[in-house]
Amino acid sequence: MLDRRKSMKADRDLDRFKELLLSSCGMFFTNERELTLSSAVTQRMSQRGIDTAELYHSLLTTDQDEFRRFIELLTVNETYFSRENDHLKLLVDKIIPEILSQRETRPVRIVSAGCSTGEEPYSIAMMLAERFGEDSGRLFYIAGTDIDSSVIARAKQGIYGKGSFRSMDKAIQDRYFKMCGPGAYQLGDIRHQVHFEVVNLKDALYPAIMQQPDIILYRNVSIYFPPQVQREIFGRLALILNEGGYLFVGATETLQHNIGLLTLMNRDSVFFYRKIPGVIIEERRSAKRNLSPREQSKPGSSRQTNYGGVPAGAVQSGIRAIRAVAASDASSVTNSRDPKSLFDDALELAISRRMDDALALLDAIIEQDGSFIKAHSLKGSIFMSASRFQEAVAVCNAILSHDPLCLEAYLMLGVTARHSGDDDDAQRRFREAIYLKSSCWLAHFYLAEILFGQGDKNRARTGYEAALRVLENGSSLELSREYFPLSYNAEQYMAICRHKLSLLKNG
């Protein structure tokens, strides 16, 4: 009985450290990793002369230096040069030249998030130097970040053992490294082209070194986080990414991040994400040009020709309305124009990424007509795109108070629940969407994704097959814009369904 009580207390003590690590930096310890955590706790308690787990836990919550040392014992830093080299070759040979062709002066900003001892960002720096020569230092800004301060210190030194070179061409190694001890090699001057900083990816704000990147490499990092933290961090990285930017995750992580924030793409058999709202925008505009005059008068249709990607007068009229609202004259503005006309302006403001302006105009529309469902839906979609999920949920509840059968509201509630890690609520919302419309491919797809993650292979297969049937039998253009204002690339989802079905077939 005594041994059992000790075991129960040890479990409670370990749970306390698990909770601290999850809340502070997103680290997740499954049963098979508990021994690592327990060993780290025991080691640091012994080194600090602390007798009880309670006292050491208290120290971790108040002493940042001790917490940093504790983290160093828990992080896995397995990496090497030219890892998953197909990603890097695609970047250097094709994507970066395309970015440079559209760039005048500003350097291309590249961030390696979770870079460990620096092999990844240094691999990119060497490959860029090979391709662009001495200009690479001027053309690119490369940053590496990691939560472990000890590996960042090692990265700055640029000294590596033989294991780090197992995928590197010997000629490249000889060109950039010099021996500095038995089995040790130091990177030359090119290491000064890479900037390093200690960063906790779960922090609410990221430092300047990470801001406005054109390319983010976030590879083989999220596998150590639970699903909720994975979605949270991916959302933050998506927000800081420049428009048109690229985000790469590890080959085994690609599909788990497909949560609607960025567009999943496949090029040269390499999957990656891109921040390209313009793709869906142009599809939507093309479709509108083919609508009948009667259809064009519906909410959400464009009334004007566009130039430079924005309809003539749309932004200007929207701004005028917003300024009037800001001057506390909302009633005169909205009463002088039809809400549907104002909504078209709000839509174009959102399309042109002027989200604050769009929200201000939508608030004015809703003040005039609280039952205008499309205005609520667009507002909820904007909140979702900014990872403002609680506000999106509030908007969905407002929609349902006016229209309890609004399919879009249930879809948005399902997506926000999934982002929050509440798979039970997400399943309920997606089932409600399917009840309202049995051919709702998006709800079938997300239900299948949840079931796939839970290991329910048979039901996941049924869900993917249902989604794929609808997608294959419909117009990709129409399906992509079917659940306005949620924009989805139907071709992308067909590819994912087929891929998951092949995994289920072979598994």
Image (cartoon, rainbow, N blue to C red):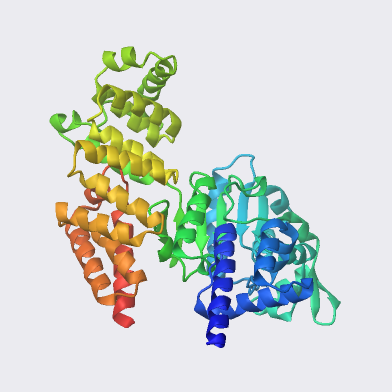
- In this rendering, the answer to whether 461 lies above or below 258 is below
Left or right: residue 13 versus residue 292 is: right
Q: In the figure, residue 427 lies in which quadrant? A: bottom left
Instruction: Name the one closer to the observer, 202 or 19.
Output: 19
Q: Nearer the viewer, residue 151 or 21?
A: 21
Residue extending farthest to the right is 181
| Displayed quadrant of residue 44 | bottom right
Q: Position of residue 24 (x, y in %)?
A: 59, 58
Residue ID at (38%, 36%): 351
Q: Residue at 59% of width from left, 60% of height from top? A: 25
Q: Quadrant of residue 329?
A: top left
Q: Nearer the viewer, residue 63 or 299?
A: 63
Q: Is residue 228 above or below residue 38?
A: above
Question: Could one spot residue 235 in this view of the protein?
Answer: yes
Q: Quadrant of the C terminus?
A: bottom left
In this picture, residue 369 sits left or right of residue 295: right
Residue 419 point in image, percent of width and height = 40, 55
Left or right, residue 99 beside residue 59 = left
Q: Nearer the viewer, residue 81 or 196?
A: 196
Q: Residue at x 69, y 59 (%)?
A: 129
Residue 437 in view: no
Residue at 37%, 46% in the rendered image:
279
